Amino acid sequence: MRTPTLVSKTLSDLTGATVYLKFENLQFTAAYKERGALNTLLQLDETARSKGVIAASAGNHAQGLAYHATRLGIPSTIVMPLNTPTVKVTQTEGHGANVILHGETFDAAYAHSRELEAEKGYTFVHPFDDARIIAGQGTAALEMLEDVPELDALVIPIGGGGLISGAAVVAKSEGRALEVVGVEAELYPSMYNRIRGTSMPCEGDTLAEGIAVKEPGGITSKMVEALVDDIVLVSERRLEEAVSLLLQIEKTVVEGAGAAGLAALLAEPKRFRGKKVGTILCGGNIDPRLLANVLLRDLARSGRLARLRIRLQDRPGALFNVARIFHEQGVNIIEVYHQRVFTTLPAKGLITDIECETRDRDHLDRLMTALRRAQYEVSPVELA
């Protein structure tokens, strides 16, 4: 599907750049990975088509390959680790693939897929380190520059490097100065390490699991080194902010990896200020519960949702008197947590956590000031 490229006035105002978004999260499987998978499948000869294809993936590559293989009448097998969430297994099977669960890690699943490739004569389809995959992913950048030829820069997420390699080929063939900047999560700077010769660790629970790759591709690394101007690392907080802003402002659901480009614009506004910048919202497959957590954390950081820890005396009317101050300040109380036993206070002391909803940070500050004027000890429970 040719997805739309649209300018975001609000995000442009926030970042100081003119921000164009390509909505690859609108693909049928909600990710750009379909492009490379389809390009590869279309180039198979009849013998390879009849034997089928195989891949090791628990993510968007699995679904993109399964969907288009089924559509073209090509058998597909996807090997996933045993601990793959059931929803991902079900979705991939729903697209027509034969899913095999093998091994405790992705590496074990990958090794098994290569064994089956040799045994059954399947064609292995790599998620990123293949010229056909890279060329397919690059069509997203082709479309983007056809729609907005005056772009000054492309800001592209990097996992294994397939998308940015294809996009960089397109950008550098334009015959003009078009900057290509890659984006990785701080927790997984694998391509950054490869290109810069650093050895930062690649580990941890990142919101951008779609680009949490420990080892980038051999082909893609060479292409990135030759064609990409720079790589930016973004924090988990910026990734969360970007996911939240895209939902609130653009009304579109984007996974952490898909929001990495916007996260870079938020992290380094001076770098992109005044430029026309395009970024690809490369996927929208995010767990609903995780998305809810991200949105609530963003509300907390902006001051619209807060938990205040208040010290009270354990006597009749204590909670009523505090609640009256919340009422006077126009603050909505959502939850109240009383703590009498597990506290360092004396036996007659009482800690109360009150979760509340305010209009903004200033409104929250006015509430805390009013509580302190009434001689209450109050402190916000901060997020990491």
Image (cartoon, helix red, strand yellow):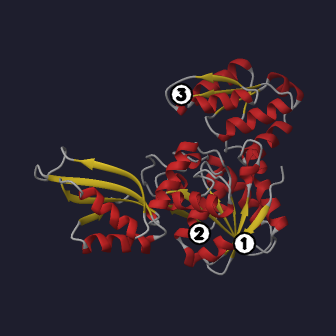
For the residues labelled 1 and 2, the Cα–Cα distance comes to 16 Å
Is disc 1 in contact with disc 2, using a CB cutoff of under 8 Å?
no
- Please indicate whether residue 365 sits to the left or right of residue 111 in the image: left
Q: How many marks?
A: 3
- Please indicate whether residue 360 sits to the left or right of residue 149 in the image: left
Mark seen at residue 178: 1
For the residues labelled 3 and 2, the Cα–Cα distance comes to 37 Å
- Please indicate whether residue 222 sits to the left or right of residue 94 in the image: left
Residue at (85, 23) in percent of width and height: 50
Q: Outermost residue, top direction?
A: 119
Give SS at disc 2: helix
Residue at (81, 41) in percent of width and height: 38
Give SS at disc 3: helix
The residue lying toward the viewer, choosing from 168 and 265, is 265
Pinpoint residue 160: horizontal percent, then vertical percent.
61, 48
Mark 3 burial class by Cα count in 10 Å: few <14, some 14-19, many 20+: some
Quarter occupied by residue 57: top right
Return the residue at label 2.
265
Mark seen at residue 108: 3
Is disc 1 in contact with disc 3, using a CB cutoff of under 8 Å?
no
The kind of residue tagged 3 is Ala
Q: Is residue 135 above or below residue 241?
A: above
Quarter occupied by residue 130: top right
Mark 1 or mark 2: which is in front?
2
First-in-chain label (1 vs 3): 3
Pinpoint residue 122: horizontal percent, then vertical percent.
74, 25
Give SS at disc 1: loop
First-in-chain label (3 vs 2): 3
First-in-chain label (1 vs 2): 1
Q: Is residue 163 above or below residue 238?
A: above
